[in-house]
Image: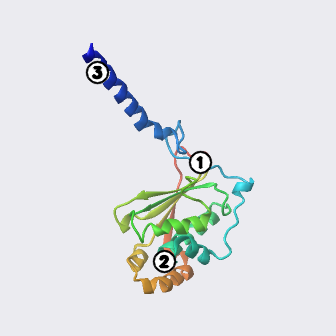
Amino acid sequence: MRRISLVVAVIIICSSAIGILTYPRYVLGSSEEDHHFVGAVGGENEYNRGQAPEDWWGQIEQMHGHVGPWNVLGWRIGQAALREFDTKWGRHELDVICYVPIKTPYSCMADGLVIGTGNTIGRLDLRLAEVVSLDFIHVCIRRKDGTGPILIFRPKQTYLRHIDAPKPEELEKLSRECSNMAENDLFEVTRTMPSEAKK
């Protein structure tokens, strides 16, 4: 009898563990149907009428603690995305995934994307995904409603190598340089239309 009770207890514990391990895909902003993250809903309600910072440089400095070229690169990509998708800062209509090595200074690009778009990690409309080297750094952006293209912002490798591992005394110079460079010297944009995208 004890052996049967022990087997039943083990089955119950294992079943609970499996349920716990698989449950998170249905919460934290993920869709039960598609099993992908969906962030906060955009719109014109009072919580989504964010005001783009007038002093974006100062906002990066306040949020991040300093301004570096990776922050500014993220801000430039975010601004280009708002223009390309014809949306406004803080509307939360876009889904942004930043593919970087998960260490500084590369991850600093995410804070620039926050200031550039108004999207945030907490709202699940800005996420980090890990890549193994500079060669694979890119930012994918699409509309949350699935309409239109996916835009892939791929920073130029020559530029990334130029700003890789900057010395503290070079941060401001490199950041100002990034803020003034032509977009096509910083990154290239690829448009792709997923087969499941709504036309």
- Check disc 1 and report the residue beneath it: 146
Q: CA distance from mark 3 to mark 2?
A: 60 Å
Q: Report the residue at 51% width, 84% height from top.
A: 177
Image-quadrant location for residue 51: bottom right
Q: Position of residue 17 (x, y in %)?
A: 38, 33
Q: Amino acid at mark 2?
A: Pro
Q: Position of residue 179 (x, y in %)?
A: 56, 79
Q: Which residue, as the protein is rendered here, is positioned at the far left?
A: 3
Q: Amino acid at mark 1?
A: Gly
- Whether the residues at callouts 2 and 1 have beta carbons within 8 Å, the answer is no
- Check disc 2 and report the residue beneath it: 69
Give the label on residue 6, or none. Answer: 3
Q: Is residue 21 visible?
A: yes
For label 1, count other residues whose C-alpha is less than 10 Å away and answer few (under 14), some (14-19) or many (20+).
some
- Asked if residue 176 is positioned above or below residue 84 in the image, the reply reads below
> SS at mark 2?
helix
Q: Is residue 150 visible?
A: no
Q: Report the residue at 58% width, 53% height from top.
A: 123
For label 3, count other residues whose C-alpha is less than 10 Å away and answer few (under 14), some (14-19) or many (20+).
few
Sequence-earlier tag: 3 or 1:
3
Image-quadrant location for residue 162: bottom left
Q: Nearer the viewer, residue 3 or 113?
A: 3
Q: Nearer the viewer, residue 95 or 103?
A: 103
50 horizontally vs 21: left or right: right
Q: Report the residue at 42% width, 35% height from top.
A: 20
Image-quadrant location for residue 170: bottom left
